[in-house]
Image (cartoon, rainbow, N blue to C red):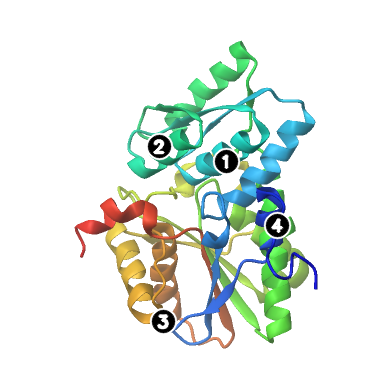
Amino acid sequence: MSSKEVHVFENAIDLMQGMWPTPLLKLNIGNDVWAKLEFYNPFSHSIKDRTALFLFKEAIKQNAKSIVEATSGNTGIALSALSSIFKINFTVFIPSTAPSSFKVLMKILGANVISAGNSTTELLPLVKKLSEFNGYTHLDQFHNEINVLAHYETTAKEIDEQTKVSGIKVKRIIATMGTAGHIVGIAKYFKEKYGDDVEIIGVEPAQGERIPGIKRVTDDKDNKFLKIAKIDRIIEIKFKEAVEGVIDVARNDGILIGLSSGATVSAYKKVIRESKDEGATILIFPDDAFKYVNELEEYV
């Protein structure tokens, strides 16, 4: 038996990749609905570990000495961890509206944290200016197609392999949209392999609503990722509905999921009410609840 099979690893990078595929769990919130538990990734406890690893590897190939990125949270934690491991200077710009837990954790990992603005969109010009004048390598998760490739090569393939082995007939995959990297990577893979036999459904905040970790891509006309693969439809979710999704899974399955995961659950509830199609639904749960305790407190 290999050390990987008994989960013994020589370093944190081997730990991360050695724990793939992340679990696929059948939920008790509906019929034939499964969750991809991305909070099993070790650095940020989120799906963003995948994006960060692929972006970071590319930066190392370019002999980057210092890197900079704008992030609403999880990507920043993952990049902070990788920067600590590889001893590369990392400056992160994060919106002042982001949960404070993200900033604390990035500082503990040694990142230079700059908190400003209300969104990553506002911060991108500052990041670009820093990269132009100070020799920093801007990873640019919002426009770098390596973001999509990370999930095409890992997340999507894992889902395909896990469902095949388990005899799960996938009808639809529901995922939230922030950079849109993971949903587009998944969509590209499944549309190339199965066409419209698998429906890809995106989830975004309703107009005027804020859900940490995701944003309204329909308002972002410059998102080039959405041109790479077909997203069949997008469902809008309110913050309160995202919280209700968190509570629903907690009280039926005992799993504490994050707010973007809760938004995915609420989107599933809306989809399933209007659909009579047989087949499984796969929900992508990007992270867990523990960074969002302050946001959840008023509802409990």
Q: Nearer the viewer, mark 3 or mark 4?
A: 4
Number of labelled discs? 4
Q: Nearer the viewer, mark 1 or mark 4?
A: 4
Q: Alpha-carbon distance for marks 2 and 4? A: 28 Å
Disc 1 marks a residue whose amino acid type is: Ala
Q: Nearer the viewer, mark 2 or mark 4?
A: 4
Residue at 62% in and 39% down: 82
Residue at 45% in and 80% down: 272
Residue at 70% in and 57% down: 9
Q: Crowding at label 1, few (<14), some or many (≥20) Cα neighbours within 10 Å?
A: many
- Residue 160 screen position, x and y as percent: 71, 72
Left or right of residue 263: residue 50 = right
Specify the quadrant that holds the C terminus. bottom left
Disc 3 element: loop
Disc 3 marks a residue whose amino acid type is: Ile
Q: Nearer the viewer, mark 3 or mark 2?
A: 2
Q: Alpha-carbon distance for marks 3 and 4? A: 35 Å
Disc number for residue 29? 3
CB within 8 Å, label 3 to label 2 = no
Which residue corresponds to mark 1?
Answer: 81
Tell me which numbered mark, 3 or 1, is placed earlier along the sequence. Answer: 3
Q: Is residue 125 above or below residue 57?
A: above
Q: Alpha-carbon distance for marks 3 and 1? A: 34 Å
Tell me which numbered mark, 1 or 4, is placed earlier along the sequence. Answer: 4
Disc number for residue 103? 2
Between 24 and 80, the one lying in front of the other is 80
